[in-house]
Image (cartoon, helix red, strand yellow):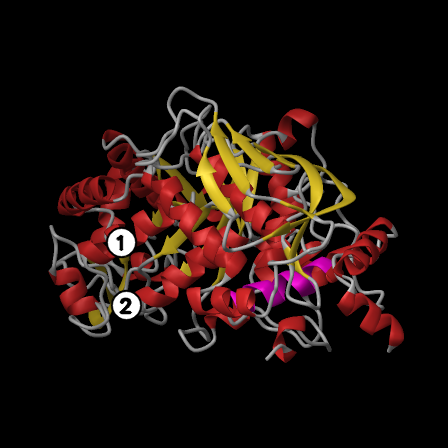
């Protein structure tokens, strides 16, 4: 008690003790517990960092995040202006919380501890890319130098600055007296993989716009940069097409309440852009199209013997009208979604309906396909790829398209999702295609216990192949399919399990210490909860802020 009273009466002493604890690797607070990482709550772990014992304090009354006079960006670069406001809030809280902090003396005193007055952001490229969209070639490298009185965040463009702002916010922590502290720190960071994605399925359960935007926010906390929007599938077609409104009118769960209008889609794209996130839509064909019933003669009529069964199968690849429709649809998609890529699906095509249909059989004979329905699928896919190419888009496909021997253009990205992914990754890259990994990261599959550890342990390069093959691995995606997921449980099912994927795709290959990861991830999860994301707990414990008045 005497020591505690002395610390309360002599703030300089308590700051000194905090610094000594950090120097001893005890973490980022006055805590006797051995549950702190020497890297605090950083997630994902930066590639190169040096955290020193010297401490600075931050006050909401004086601290600023601002454009440096040396930066090519300035006030009016809205993507950074908005990010500055957002991260000031994440560091200091709401105006009410800031007033309470100042009234209590938190961050207002500090004894002999120097105050950090500003974070200056320097964009070095002549074009900061303020009004552009992130792309597959976006540079996300950044540097941070935290020293008194002004910290510096330097990056080539706004995208690296966004990643650096998240990291800076994670460097700030509270002591038990509500004083905000940051250590003298140097960081040089960049992602290991260019494609770090989250897939959401909005067909099996419609996800309200608010839930999608919340997910994008959480993605930025974990440095994900691709939202793979599996927007339509067999159960429903919620995308409201301007060219073919009958698709959602007949295919959505409800033609008014359970759709995404053009305004909704634009809002998602802009919200994502402001967080450095690409939006890649998936319109999966020729299978997974039962909800596309709004277009007459698009789906293949199935037969039971010589009679129509009344059911329908995949898209009918034998009709010219099919490709006329697809051309118009993908023309619209290419205009609505600015990213250079579209995901075309191509998985799980059931040939049974095609086999039952006499018109399909006749078409195959004329084309010389015999009874090999993979050739029919290949015919369809090749026509679709030509259509998409004509609209200046690249494409991604699920692995079955590759497995079935479809002739693919060299720049096709193969999305690996089935078991035995090591063999599949080796085969795809041996054929000189770019590969994207999802097989071990299907987060809709749940189990009791800390399954994040299994997710974290995956190594995308863990397959037999040359160095040249492994360079063709562009990254991976955590997939959350919607059979058992809707707005009520999405966030807790996704986070912080997806965070484990985020660190694997960002940090160095040598970042594999699960003990240290647990300490950091526990605190990162608490931070996400404090920021409004209801992420589930990793294990037994509590968040420090829970018991602070």
Mark 2 — residue?
A: 236
Name the residue rendered at 48%, 67% in the picture.
99
**Quadrant hosting residue 237:** bottom left
> In the figure, 248 relative to 186: above or below?
below
Q: Earlier in the sequence, mark 1 or mark 2?
A: 2
Magenta stretch: includes residue 27: no
> In the figure, 86 relative to 251: above or below?
above
- Please provide percent x and percent y for residue 547: 64, 79
> In the figure, 418 relative to 305: above or below?
above
Task: Please tell me which residue lies in front, 184 or 159.
Answer: 184
- Please provide percent x and percent y for residue 303: 25, 67
Please tell me how crowded label 1 is: few (under 14), some (14-19), or many (20+) other residues with Cα within 10 Å.
some
For residue 127, side relative to residue 25 (left or right) = left
> Magenta stretch?
520-531
**Quadrant hosting residue 80:** top left
Spatial separation of the CA atoms under disc 1 and disc 2: 21 Å
Magenta stretch: includes residue 522: yes
Task: Please tell me which residue lies in front, 160 or 381.
Answer: 160
């Amino acid at each position: 008690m005497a020591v505690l009273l002395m610390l309360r009466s002599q703030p300089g002493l308590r700051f000194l003790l905090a610094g000594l604890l950090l120097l001893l690797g005890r973490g980022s607070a006055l805590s006797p517990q051995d549950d702190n990482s020497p890297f605090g709550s950083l997630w994902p772990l930066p590639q190169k960092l040096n955290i020193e014992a010297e401490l600075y304090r931050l006050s909401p009354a004086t601290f600023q995040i601002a454009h440096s006079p040396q930066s090519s960006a300035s006030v009016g670069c809205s993507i950074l202006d908005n990010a500055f406001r957002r991260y000031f809030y994440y560091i200091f809280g709401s105006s009410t919380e800031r007033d309470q902090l100042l009234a209590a003396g938190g961050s207002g005193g500090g004894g002999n501890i120097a105050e950090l007055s500003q974070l200056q952001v320097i964009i070095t490229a002549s074009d900061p890319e303020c009004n552009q969209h992130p792309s597959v070639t976006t540079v996300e490298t950044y540097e941070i130098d935290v020293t008194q009185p002004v910290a510096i965040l330097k990056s080539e463009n706004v995208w690296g600055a966004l990643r650096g702002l998240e990291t800076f916010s994670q460097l700030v922590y509270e002591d038990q007296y509500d004083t905000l502290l940051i250590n003298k720190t140097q960081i040089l960071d960049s992602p290991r993989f260019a494609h770090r994605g989250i897939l959401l399925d909005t067909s099996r359960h419609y996800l309200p716009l608010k839930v999608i935007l919340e997910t994008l926010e959480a993605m930025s906390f974990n440095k994900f940069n691709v939202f793979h929007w599996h927007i339509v599938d067999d159960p429903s077609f919620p995308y409201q097409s301007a060219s073919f409104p009958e698709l959602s009118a007949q295919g959505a769960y409800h033609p008014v309440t359970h759709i995404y209008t053009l305004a909704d889609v634009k809002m998602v794209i802009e919200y994502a852009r402001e967080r450095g996130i690409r939006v890649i839509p998936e319109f999966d064909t020729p299978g997974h199209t039962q909800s596309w019933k709004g277009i007459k003669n698009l789906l293949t009529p199935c037969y039971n013997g010589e009679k129509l069964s009344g059911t329908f199968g995949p898209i009918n690849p034998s009709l010219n009208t099919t490709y006329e429709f697809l051309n118009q649809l993908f023309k619209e998609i290419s205009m609505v979604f600015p990213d250079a890529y579209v995901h075309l699906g191509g998985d799980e095509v059931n040939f049974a309906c095609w086999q039952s249909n006499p018109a399909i059989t006749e078409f195959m004979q004329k084309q010389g396909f015999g009874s090999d329905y993979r050739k029919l699928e290949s015919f369809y896919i090749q026509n679709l790829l030509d259509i998409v190419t004509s609209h200046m888009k690249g494409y991604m496909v699920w692995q079955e398209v590759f497995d079935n021997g479809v002739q693919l253009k060299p720049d096709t990205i193969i999305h690996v999702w089935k078991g035995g992914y090591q063999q599949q990754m080796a085969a795809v890259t041996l054929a000189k295609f770019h590969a994207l990994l999802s097989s071990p990261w299907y987060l809709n599959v749940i189990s009791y216990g800390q399954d994040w550890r299994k997710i974290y342990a995956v190594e995308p390069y863990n397959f037999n192949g040359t160095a040249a093959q492994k360079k063709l691995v562009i990254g991976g995606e955590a997939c959350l399919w919607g059979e058992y997921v809707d707005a009520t449980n999405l966030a807790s099912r996704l986070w912080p399990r997806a965070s484990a994927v985020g660190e694997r795709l960002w940090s160095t290959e040598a970042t594999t210490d699960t003990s240290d990861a647990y300490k950091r991830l526990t605190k990162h999860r608490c931070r996400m909860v404090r920021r409004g994301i209801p992420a589930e707990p990793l294990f037994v414990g509590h968040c420090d802020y829970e018991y602070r008045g």
